[in-house]
């Protein structure tokens, strides 16, 4: 099938015009990146975003693979001389690869089976006779004709014929689809606890004796059941009406006609389904449930990583980073507003050392020597004890400093990495962690980009997910985030630069090397002087690379150099002297878009982006999200009562709800049912990581240190 024929179904699935799909494919074939197309080719795609462009790319590839598979299957069946017009139509009508494989199943070269053994002994004609549903004759008399050295008895002849028939029935595509439909629509999943297992903490207690309809099984429960089964805690079976399906298979052969072979057909159908079809289709159903759940988990993980990367920076502040610990002490790192490390220290306020007075004196000394506005405390071991200690000092000394808890997931991985050793060769691993924790709130994107996103620890069951698919989706989330924010080419690390549209690790390293040798960049055109950065790479990257205080004011904006001529003409047209001024915004607001676009020989999409960039040249895409939640006092479980109103920050979003940091040792859970009045299909419709929420205490489990929260005001 030609690409043109693939366009219509993709357009229909996105509810867009075929021309949008066609133009997107053309742009991708020309070597343009997804971020570049989404930002700078809106006139061709009619404003498709990154996710839609990626979907088009992946879906066309899938449909192309599907058509190739259909061609291969038809060709193989034709060479066997078994291709009928009806069979051709069945194959061409398939919408999934699995459907094509089901139809191809009877024509595949079989490994050694009971049926192939029987066929090799010449019993296929006997199986054909039985399947023809004869009204007269004696099966034993027919079977006797096939008795020989290889088939010594009538019973073995009949059994061999039944084996052939059983495999033939189990390979029937339409029957397999019927079995699958019955399991998915009406079947149940059953979980039973094994007699011996290692689930001492009863993590999977819910599934020790569990039954649920497959059609209502939530993705996170599929993941939990899969993991419990993998860890040999439970056994899992599928429960559905097998008798109905066996009778359905029998009717498919006999068409309810009387036959002397009724018993043989019933035995063959029962054996074919129980021994072959049912286990095979059950595996397929379980596999598809797992794949669907994994895809959803990857999506959640990706979305959570994206929101973490897009947390607004705490610009212009000096920060004290604290990596808490008991025995080895809390590591301290002071960084300035550029992320430069100014001081490293350690104090021991906790057991077993218990040097609280000395720790307090050291903290006060640091706060006196440096104009620190925020203390960033890692949320790992000893974090709440450290938070209590710091909050107590702030209150008793009446200090004008706030603190915030920072996820330290992945900090130890980064601190032990070659990159961290290169950056801080003279520091210990824990000291590097303290610097990383401070930098995570100064500029989350620049710091978190250094860490393998799988180590960031957001999402659900990430360690059970297929690595390749997870990595590809996370790479895309990073690509999308970095390019939406843009990168300062004069300060960015090569780790950040390599995620810019059009750049690779080699070209990112080349930019840093050029910067180190020649000094800062003064305009975007200078990038063309960088070795390993060609014209195409420059085209794809330039708009996402920012130069502040350079020779060209437009270099600090997302406006692409290819549109500078139009942007300059627009500024001349409106006599704009300074980008971002009140006068500038007022003039731009009065424009007629269609007329101005025509006047500037550009399109409305590009003009709209141009107007936004000239109006707010320094606007940070991340400003629209909540920044870190700053506190100055601490909360304990004993302080809480049902109905209490609190403020918290979303730390993780999963299928069944969101975990919210309200200042306790453990995050509270807002269940999906407690987010809004009415039903929602997923928590991500309402909340994202980093959101600051107003919540109310719904339930307290003091024994398990758990707090249930609600976003629905209980007092209304």
Image (spheres, rainbow, N blue to C red):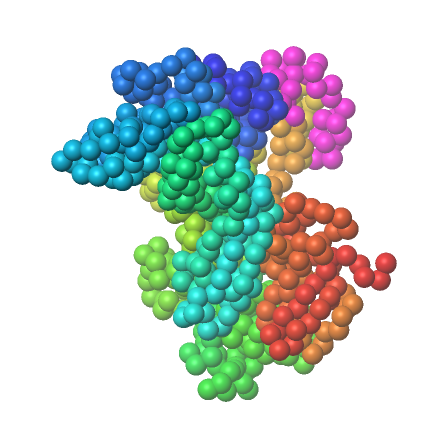
Magenta residues, dominant SS class: helix
Rendered residue at 40%/58% (across/down): 230
Q: Which residues are magenta?
A: 581-608
Query: Of 543 and 84, which appears nearest the observer?
Result: 84
Position of residue 501 relative to residue 393, above or below, is above
The residue lying furthest to the right in this view is 716
Image x and y of residue 665, in percent: 59, 72
Magenta stretch: includes residue 595: yes
Rendered residue at 47%/53% (across/down): 237
The residue lying furthest to the left in this view is 149
Disc tally is 0
Magenta stretch: includes residue 41: no
Image x and y of residue 578, in percent: 66, 32
User: Visible in this render: residue 226?
Assistant: yes
Quarter of the image for the N terminus: give it: top left
Image x and y of residue 57, in percent: 46, 27
Query: Of 460 and 545, which appears nearest the observer?
Result: 460
Query: Of 644 and 633, which appears nearest the observer?
Result: 644
Position of residue 29 relative to residue 362, above or below, is above
Image x and y of residue 555, in percent: 53, 32
- Left/right placement of residue 665 relative to residue 92 reads right
């Amino acid at each position: 099938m030609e690409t043109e024929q693939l366009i219509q179904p993709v357009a229909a699935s996105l509810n867009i015009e075929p021309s949008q799909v066609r133009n997107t494919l053309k742009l991708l074939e020309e070597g343009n990146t997804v971020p570049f197309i989404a930002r700078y080719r809106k006139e061709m795609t009619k404003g498709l975003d990154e996710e839609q462009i990626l979907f088009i790319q992946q879906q066309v590839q899938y449909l192309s693979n599907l058509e190739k598979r259909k061609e291969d299957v038809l060709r193989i069946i034709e060479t066997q001389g078994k291709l009928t017009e009806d069979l051709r139509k069945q194959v061409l009508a398939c919408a999934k690869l699995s459907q094509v494989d089901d139809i191809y199943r009877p024509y595949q070269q079989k490994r050694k089976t009971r049926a192939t053994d029987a066929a090799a002994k010449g019993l296929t004609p006997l199986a054909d006779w039985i399947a023809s549903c004869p009204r007269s004759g004696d099966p034993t008399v027919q079977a006797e004709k096939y008795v020989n050295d290889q088939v010594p008895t009538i019973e073995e002849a009949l059994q061999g014929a039944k084996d052939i028939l059983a495999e033939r029935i189990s390979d029937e595509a339409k029957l397999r689809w019927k079995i699958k439909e019955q399991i998915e629509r009406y079947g149940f999943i059953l979980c039973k606890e094994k007699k011996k297992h290692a689930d001492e903490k009863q993590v999977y207690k819910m599934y020790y004796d569990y039954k649920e309809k497959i059609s209502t099984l939530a993705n996170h429960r599929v993941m939990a059941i899969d993991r419990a089964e993998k860890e040999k805690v439970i056994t899992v079976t599928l429960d559905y009406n097998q008798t109905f399906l066996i009778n359905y298979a029998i009717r498919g052969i006999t068409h309810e006609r009387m036959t002397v072979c009724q018993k043989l057909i019933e035995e063959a159908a029962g054996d074919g389904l129980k021994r072959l079809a049912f286990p095979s289709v059950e595996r397929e159903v379980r596999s598809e449930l797992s794949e669907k759940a994994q895809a959803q988990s990857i999506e959640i993980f990706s979305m959570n990583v994206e929101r973490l990367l897009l947390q607004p920076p705490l610009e212009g502040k000096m920060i004290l980073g604290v990596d808490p610990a008991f025995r080895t002490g809390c590591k301290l790192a002071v960084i300035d507003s550029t992320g430069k490390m100014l001081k490293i220290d350690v104090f021991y306020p906790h057991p077993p050392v218990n040097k609280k007075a000395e720790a307090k004196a050291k903290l006060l000394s640091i706060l006196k020597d440096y104009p620190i506005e925020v203390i960033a405390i890692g949320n790992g071991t000893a974090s709440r004890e450290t938070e209590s200690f710091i909050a107590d000092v702030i209150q008793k000394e009446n200090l004008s400093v706030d603190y915030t808890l920072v996820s330290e997931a992945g900090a130890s991985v980064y601190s032990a990495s070659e990159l961290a050793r290169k950056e801080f060769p003279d520091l210990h691993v824990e000291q590097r962690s303290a610097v990383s924790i401070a930098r995570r709130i100064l500029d989350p994107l620049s710091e978190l980009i250094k860490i393998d996103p799988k180590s960031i620890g957001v999402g659900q069951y990430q360690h059970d997910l297929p690595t390749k698919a997870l990595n590809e989706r996370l790479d895309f989330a990073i690509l999308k985030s970095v390019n939406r924010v843009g990168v300062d080419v004069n300060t960015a690390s090569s780790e950040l630069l390599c995620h810019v549209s059009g750049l690779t690790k080699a070209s990112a390293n080349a930019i840093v090397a050029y910067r180190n040798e020649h000094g800062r960049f003064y305009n975007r055109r200078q990038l063309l002087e960088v070795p390993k950065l060609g014209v195409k790479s420059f085209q794809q990257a330039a708009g996402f690379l920012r130069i502040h205080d350079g020779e060209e004011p437009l270099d600090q904006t997302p406006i692409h150099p290819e549109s500078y001529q139009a942007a300059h003409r627009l500024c001349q047209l409106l006599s704009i002297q300074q980008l971002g001024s009140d006068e500038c915004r007022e003039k731009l607001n009065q424009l007629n878009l269609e007329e101005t676009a025509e006047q500037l020989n550009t399109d409305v999409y590009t003009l709209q982006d141009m107007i936004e960039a000239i109006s707010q040249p320094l606007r940070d895409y991340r400003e629209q999200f909540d920044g870190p939640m700053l506190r100055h006092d601490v909360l304990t479980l004993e302080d809480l009562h049902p109905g209490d109103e609190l403020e918290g920050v979303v730390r993780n979003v999963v299928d069944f709800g969101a975990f919210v940091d309200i200042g306790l040792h453990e995050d509270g859970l807002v269940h999906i049912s407690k987010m809004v009045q009415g039903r929602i299909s997923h928590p991500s419709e309402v909340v994202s990581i980093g959101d600051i929420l107003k919540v109310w205490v719904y339930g307290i489990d003091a024994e398990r240190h758990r707090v249930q929260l609600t976003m629905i005001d209980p007092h209304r």
